[in-house]
Amino acid sequence: MAQIKALLFNDPSCPWGYSASPTLRTLEWRYRDQIEWHLAVIGLSDENHPVRLSPEQMSDRYFDFRCRYGMPFAIETKIRKFTSATACKVITAARLLYPGSEWRVLRTLQLLHFNTPLILDDRRQLGEALETVPGIEAEVVMGAVDNPEVVSAYEADYAHARSATGTATHLQHKTAPYSAGERYTAPSVIFDYGERRVEVGGFQPVEAYDVMIANLDPGLKRVGHAEDPLEVLALYPAGLTTQEVATIMTG
């Protein structure tokens, strides 16, 4: 049974959280089931906190991310602005109804958001996206998005993501300000091991996570880099991007 628990703050609309996928996959490769991962959605934007960038500005930004970090980004401009709160509630509903599926839903929405015309607050499109996720019933998940227990769980994640004031992440200037304090940015991770807690805030190199994990429990088994791409893909039957495979093989 895993003794280290890791809480990842992420949002399907965040290019930083998406660009960290190679690092996160590498950690999964190295430590396997020795770390128990949990997901908290941030809720970067909603009707009260809309996206500030125009679709054209976002396309330019995504092109920069593709060049800098290697994850696939289409540069096709979205037809309109969007918010991420509904997509975050979809992820939360999946987590409550089909525990463990939240990771597949997040992954699906990230890939579609950054590579297709998908609009993250379009419920019809979100439902169609869920049809491609194995192990869940899209209609059931979409039908639960506005249920009180889903909204409550989402609001708990939302509040937790906005509790970064005075933390190690804040000290490193890896948080983002909001009206009442500091918010965790994607892909911040909080690691818990017994009574010990450490943070790797914001976008960091894989070595930052690795050092923290090694100090939490030096007795862990750490798998070295992969020698063959097929070896990597065997652990991820749903597939990986080229950058994810490359990072696991060279990390």
Image (cartoon, helix red, strand yellow):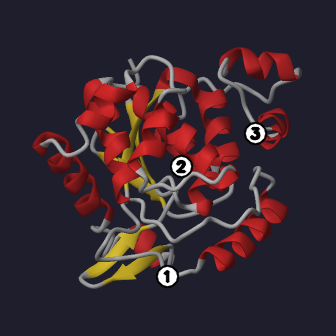
Residue drawn at 27 percent across, 67 percent down: 163
Residue 227: x and y, percent?
Answer: 88, 22
Label count reads 3
Q: Quadrant of the C terminus?
A: top right
| Label 2–label 1 contact, CB within 8 A | no
Q: Is residue 212 visible?
A: yes
Q: Check disc 3: other Cα within 10 Å, few if <14, some if 14-19, many if 20+.
A: many
Looking at marks 3 and 1 on the same chain, the residue that comes earlier in the sequence is marked by 1
Disc 2/disc 3 C-alpha distance (Å): 21 Å
User: Quick one: 16 or 107, which is closer to the camera?
Assistant: 107
Q: Please tell me whether mark 2 or mark 1 is closer to you in this view.
A: 1
Residue drawn at 88 percent across, 20 percent down: 228
Residue 247: x and y, percent?
Answer: 79, 41
Looking at marks 2 and 1 on the same chain, the residue that comes earlier in the sequence is marked by 1
Label at residue 74: none
Label at residue 52: 1
Q: Amino acid at mark 1?
A: Arg
Residue drawn at 76 percent across, 28 percent down: 224
Q: Which residue is mark 3?
A: 244
Left or right for 181, reference 213: left
Left or right for 142, reference 135: left
Q: Check disc 1: other Cα within 10 Å, few if <14, some if 14-19, many if 20+.
A: few
Q: Quadrant of the N terminus?
A: top left
Q: Against 156, is 216 above or below? A: above
Disc 2/disc 1 C-alpha distance (Å): 34 Å
Looking at marks 2 and 3 on the same chain, the residue that comes earlier in the sequence is marked by 2
Q: Amino acid at mark 2?
A: Met
| Label 3–label 1 contact, CB within 8 A | no
Name the element at disc 2: helix
Q: Check disc 2: other Cα within 10 Å, few if <14, some if 14-19, many if 20+.
A: some
Q: Which residue is mark 2?
A: 212
